[in-house]
């Protein structure tokens, strides 16, 4: 089955170049995202534009399948990968992950800073992505908990 989908779909990565059309496209994708980690509320277009123009990513690409935009991904200097595909294109997830792993290499390990592997960040609500990553051989390596507000001592 994998080969039949792989032969029918051509996946291309287009580097984000911070131009107006890509900024608008990325904003539209952000509005459609169902499982977010990095933001709780949707930023304004101006805040989004400023972020794109000054993004902290090592690599940021728009994902195209048969010349149609289906999502985007970024890789941080910490070797962390975040992949966001349109909900109706999740069937492409394993093929995009595979292409990322083939096309890019993690940066060299720095003890207590980054591992010598890619770590994929996914929302804990995204059970489909977790299942696919596990089926591809990825191992759960960390659970991250966030405090949204300052907590007070309970002593």
Image (spheres, rainbow, N blue to C red):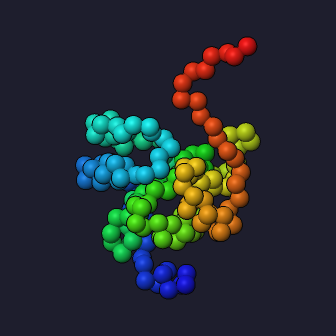
> In the figure, is residue 108 to the left or right of 10?
right
Q: Is residue 38 above or below residue 67?
A: above
- Compared to residue 11, the image places residue 100 above or below, namely above
**Residue 147 seen anywhere in this rendered image of the structure:** yes
Q: Residue at x 32, y 35 (%)?
A: 47
Position of residue 46 measured from the top left corner of the image (x, y, whole percent): 28, 36
Q: Position of residue 18 (x, y in %)?
A: 33, 48
The one of 60 and 133 positioned closer to us in this rendering: 133
User: Quadrant location of the C terminus?
Assistant: top right
Taking the view exactly as shown, the residue that stands out farthest to the left is: 20
**Going by the image, does 101 lie left or right of 39?**
right
In the rendered image, residue 78, in percent from the top left (x then y), is placed at 61, 45
Q: Residue furthest top?
A: 155
For image coordinates 45% across by 39% down, the residue present is 39
Viewer-closest of 64 and 151: 151
State which quadrant residue 9 falls in: bottom left
Between residue 98 and residue 139, name the one nearer to us.
139
Q: Quadrant of the N terminus?
A: bottom right
Residue 99 seen in the figure: no
Answer left or right for 14 relative to 137: left
Residue in the image at 40% along x and 61% along y: 86
Q: How many marks?
A: 0
- On the image, the x and y values in percent for residue 113 come to 68, 40
């Amino acid at each position: 089955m994998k080969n039949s989908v792989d032969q029918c779909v051509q996946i291309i990565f287009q580097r984000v170049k911070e131009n107006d059309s890509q900024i608008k496209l990325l904003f539209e994708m952000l509005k459609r995202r169902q499982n977010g980690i990095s933001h709780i509320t949707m930023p304004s277009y101006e805040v989004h534009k400023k972020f794109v123009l000054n993004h902290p990513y090592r690599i940021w690409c728009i994902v195209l399948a048969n010349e149609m935009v289906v999502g985007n991904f970024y890789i941080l200097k910490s070797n962390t990968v975040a992949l966001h595909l349109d909900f109706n294109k999740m069937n492409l997830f394993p093929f995009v992950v595979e292409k990322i792993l083939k096309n890019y290499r993690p940066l060299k390990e720095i003890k207590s800073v980054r591992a010598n592997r890619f770590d994929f960040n996914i929302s804990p609500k995204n059970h489909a992505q977790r299942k696919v990553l596990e089926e591809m051989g990825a191992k759960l390596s960390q659970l991250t908990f966030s405090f949204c507000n300052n907590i007070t001592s309970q002593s």
